[in-house]
Amino acid sequence: MDAAESSGLAAFRAAVSESLHVLASRRFGVFWSANFLSNVGTWAQMVAQPWLLLSLGSSSFLLGLDAFALSGPVLLLTLFGGVLADRADRRRVIVLFQSIQMLCPTLIVLLLGWGTVRPWEVICLSLVIGVTDALSMPAFQTIVPSIVEASEVPAATALNSAQFNLCRILGPALAGLIMAWTGALGAFAVSAASYLPVIFIALTLLPSGAAIARGTVPTDYRRLFSGVRETMQDATLRGAVLTVFSSSALCGPLMTFCPVLIRDAFRGDVASFGIAVSAFGVGGVLGAAGLLGVRASRDRRKLTSFAGVLYGLVLVAAAVDQWFWVLPAVLALGGIAMTLCDTSANTLILARATARARGEAVSLYMLSMRGGLAAGSLVTGLVVARLGVREALLINGLLAIAVQGYLARAWFADGSGRSQIKSGSPP
């Protein structure tokens, strides 16, 4: 091993060590652990719900509509969620909306127990979750900069991404075991219980009245969404938002319509779907683990754009694949690409946005990620119903490659002369 390789390996080990040190801190460690438990339950429901809809006779369009109901409210409400994150008591916002969300899988458990569940009821409850998510997630996302040092934000964001994708593995595996024993009812029961850790950390981790300082000042309604304008005027932040939006809209439907791909193209069952989702989660963990070794000074724009193009190539590969045994490897690569794209962009936004606009900047990130997925799932559902799932994924993949290449050229040209991280932006 030459000196350059030795130096690179030492730098990678140092970066990983610094990242794991963040996890050892009490506040972030509790936050991470509670999120882990909560997301396991969420992913158990994410596996159970599409198969429940398919078992109730739902079409591909209804699957897309369910995904739109879950993520569509972001398009209308997440900017208001950003205003809440910047101006209201974040603890109260999180507790209120997470408690409402917990009622939704609880109601599905009751409906399944009574044997009266219908597709429209499941979709309506997804809409309730979507609305409360849009209003509460910006507040939830801005917790990290308030409990770690500014220099630790990239590591904390990567650790959160690793936790989320680890749950993509454990959640489907747990759902498969539970559904084999109790059916979908058990998976939704686990999902309902999984909201308790999130509510717990909101009550205990954040102090009462944990809004930023300007929350005590009367609101100037003329300046509502000023953080949105500030974010979109910054070429670096604007590029991150647009890249994530296009990736989510064009590539995100891969997992939304994975149940249809498994059933129609590979004649698989719920166990096959669980394997596919777990493989995507494995890739997500690998992508997040790789980000732990990336220095804070690394150009996140290049990582984000490269991953966006790679994600498009994954869709093309999934569309032309004829063998199920190849699909898990393809989806694992998709998990890597999605994690690199979204997490790198999120890190860039959290680190660069000013403190007064961070909530609204994060709401734009949520809008691009969740709103893009909602719009993309609805449109892709129509294409799947008309042309077929393979054809729809192929079209999306080719479009994603072209769009990401165009955005990358514009992003690097506009933002190459600016510092990615503003050192004067305290958490």
Image (cartoon, rainbow, N blue to C red):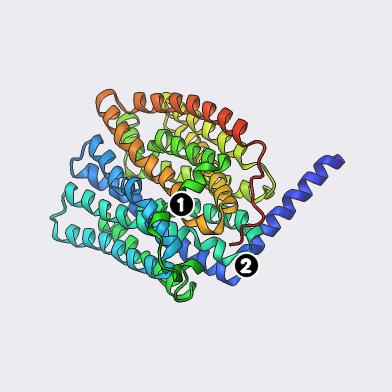
Residue pictured at 48% horizontal, 66% vertical: 214
Q: Nearer the viewer, residue 197 or 55?
A: 197
Q: Quadrant of residue 149?
A: bottom right
Q: Which mark is residue 226?
A: 1
Q: Please tell me whether mark 1 sits on a helix, a strand or a loop.
A: helix
Q: Where is residue 6 shown, x and y percent of the image?
A: 82, 45
151 w.r.t. 250: above or below: below
Point out the tag, 1 or 2, that comes first from the N-terminus.
2
Q: Which mark is residue 84?
A: none
Residue drawn at x 32%, y 67% is: 99
| Picture quarter with the C terminus | bottom right
Q: CA distance from mark 1 to mark 2?
A: 36 Å
Mark 1 or 2: the one toward you? 1
Is residue 392 visible in the rendered image? The answer is yes
Q: Position of residue 294 (x, y in %)?
A: 67, 47
Tag 2: residue type? Answer: Ala
Residue at 40% across / 24% down in the picture?
Answer: 394
Tell whether label 2 touches label 1 (CB within 8 Å): no
Residue under circle 2? 24
Disc 1: CA contacts within 10 A as few (<14), some (14-19) or many (>=20): some
> Circle 2 — which element?
helix
What residue type is disc 1 on?
Ser
The residue nearer to you, when weighing 11 against 371, is 371
Q: Is residue 70 above or below residue 400?
A: below
Quarter location, residue 18: bottom right
Closer to the camera in the image, 341 or 6: 341
User: Is 112 situated above or below 276?
Assistant: below
User: Where residue 328 sits: x, y (%)?
Assistant: 47, 37
